[in-house]
Amino acid sequence: MTTKFFEKLSSNLNDLLTNSNEYNVIIEVGQVPNNQTFKAHSIILSSRCSYFKNKLSSITCGEGNTKKIHQTNISVKAFDFIIKYIYSGVISLEKVDTSAIFDLLIASNEFGLKELVEHIQLILIKNHASWLRLNFSLVYQTSFKDDNFNELRHFCANIVAKYPNIIFDSDEFITLPENILIFVLKLDDLQMDEGTIWDYVIKWGIAQNPSLNINLDQWSDTDFLTLKNTLQNCLPLVRYFQIP
């Protein structure tokens, strides 16, 4: 019979983080004046997080036989959650502001914590769907920055399919990266007629070439060729047979 005492182990490791003086890693997080120093142990960081394993292997020891890491691109609040998760395997987000949870998702992905990334996505979708909808542009574009955000991307795709104008009529539409536009065009259940989709695709393509004349009547063959080349990956996705 095997008995597992994970809860006690988790508690002891968390105590090691908060109370131990036997640290050998100093992590400077955030930017002045909103910065903070965290003291940690290389053996735990390396075994629990591939990011830190690679980072620590490239740093030489300094004063006091310690290694120093600077994480200026991460907020102190997000890193506090992450370091506690690394040590204890525990995270509680019940009373945390949704924007902070979203920041934590991005930070967790930067540290390669896939388990945490998957968990936070499910928490956001299950408990904070209204916030995701209100901040749709941010959420949708973030979901395409890494394949680890697949759950978030699927959530957004369902919304876009039902309410495509949330993308096509947004101020950010003409600045969408091509891969996002292609993803939208590939949605089989997109609730928008193909003629309208065609108009939006042309609008996007023209916006990618500011030198093109706004008046199409004044376009040269070269101008049309420029637009065709810009849209070479998008045009095959338009269902021309459905255009009246």
Image (cartoon, rainbow, N blue to C red):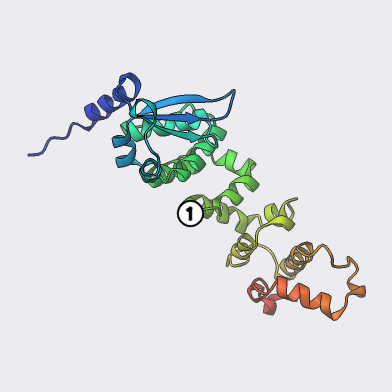
Name the residue located 51 percent from the left edge and 55 percent from the top edge: 154
- Identified by mark 1, the residue type is Asn
Q: Position of residue 171 (x, y in %)?
A: 75, 50
Identify which residue, 192 or 95, lies in the foreground: 95
Question: Farthest residue in the front direction?
Answer: 63
Instruction: Locate residue 243: give its quadrant.
Output: bottom right
Question: 10 Å neighbourhood of mark 1: few (<14), some, or many (≥20)?
Answer: some
Q: Position of residue 102 (x, y in %)?
A: 53, 38
Give the labeled residue for mark 1: 150
Left or right, residue 34 beside residue 66: right
Looking at the image, residue 14 lies above or below residue 132: above
Left or right, residue 114 beside residue 202: left
Identify which residue, 140 or 34, lies in the foreground: 34
Q: Position of residue 95 (x, y in %)?
A: 48, 26
Instruction: Locate residue 197: give its quadrant.
Output: bottom right
Q: Is any part of residue 91 visible from this angle?
A: no
Looking at the image, residue 42 lies above or below residue 151: above
Looking at the rendering, in which quadrant would you find the C terminus? bottom right
Q: Is any part of residue 115 visible from this angle?
A: yes
Q: Position of residue 14 (x, y in %)?
A: 31, 26
